[in-house]
Amino acid sequence: MRFDEGYSGKVFIMSHPTHEDAQAIIYGMPMDWTVSFRPGSRFGPNRIREASLGLEEYSPYMDKHLEDVKYFDAGDIPLPFGNPQRSLDMIYDYAKKILDLGKFPLGLGGEHLVSWPILQAVHEKYPDFALIHIDAHADLREEYEGEPLSHSTPVRKTCELIGPENVYSFGIRSGMREEFAYAQDSGMYMAKFEVAEPLKEVLPKLKGRNVYVTIDIDVLDPAFAPGTGTAEAGGITSKELLESIQLIAQSDVHVIGADLVEVAPIYDPTEKTPIAASKFIREILLGWVK
């Protein structure tokens, strides 16, 4: 697990040297074995770390400094290339250890399937949790071309695990007709196209609840985040996602963990995607880690 061994590679800016007194543990999941279009998100975690070195440590959004929160960057889980099931098992074990230590798990992807084993581990500790899912895609397929282990299936799997009435999706603008029909008929919440305004409606209803948040960077319009495997036109701005992170921070929900996935830096020579992602991680650390 490497928590006690330390990590000699790139780390997120101002990471503490050890995990013992950390409130949160950042960890990377360099997996893109099941993507349906463009691979490369396995390189996302390290590029987000590198981009973080250009951040200011102070956030005017939260009026807080990174020295106000203790976090440890544990590096990337050494996932076996091309082996989805073994990789998911390793992510589950890793997330479970973080949760067992009483730390806030903050994962960097990697394709969106990496969220599924984390959510399984979260469910064991917090069986009553709700999921906030911010994404361009519904991710409600049961399988993709006959394969149930796909980056297009984690939200459907989560609906089956915790009940669709406990799943809240925002920013959705892409998916099969059957996925949208499932969302409508199952009782889950789906906000199409927007994130911040529907969050204002939903967050009061989640008051006092344990909530896990998963963010797919492709919720942003490709103008703001071209570096992703399955870009979708018509997305939200970086400003709206920052506002949404702040809304969650200011709400009465209890965020128990989060991940940010699908940064694929090879498709963005400007590096605006990992730069944006690193800023979102800073805001999550300052706003959601209590």
Image (cartoon, rainbow, N blue to C red):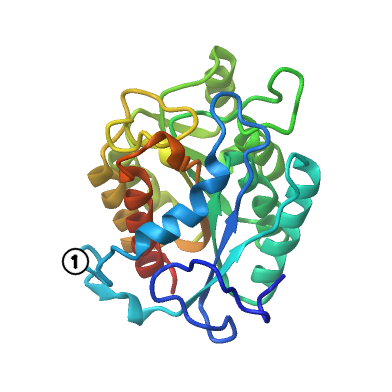
**In this view of the protein, can residue 213 be seen by the observer?**
no
What residue appears at the point 67 percent right and 80 percent down from the top-left corner? Answer: 5
Q: Residue furthest bottom?
A: 21
Q: Visible in this render: residue 27?
A: yes
Judge left or right: residue 130 versus residue 96.
left
Observer-nearest of 228 and 249: 228
Farthest residue in the top direction?
Answer: 177
The x and y percentages for residue 201 are 33, 43
Which one is in front, 273 or 162? 273
Residue situated in front as seen by the camera: 113 or 203: 113
Label 1: element kind: loop
Residue drawn at x 34%, y 81% as measured from the top left: 67
Few, some or many C-alpha atoms within 10 Å of disc 1 (few <14, some 14-19, many ≥20)?
few
Which residue reaches farthest left?
60
Tell me which residue sits at (48%, 68%) in the image: 11
Residue 168, relative to residue 183: is it above or below? Answer: below
Q: Position of residue 137 (x, y in %)?
A: 49, 29
Relative to residue 225, is residue 208 drawn left or right?
Answer: right
Q: Quadrant of residue 233?
A: top left
**Residue displayed at 52% across by 23% down:** 184
Q: Amino acid at mark 1?
A: Pro
Where on the picture, by quarter, is residue 3?
A: bottom right
Q: Is residue 223 left or right of residue 3?
A: left
Q: Position of residue 276 (x, y in %)?
A: 32, 49
The residue tagged 1 is 60
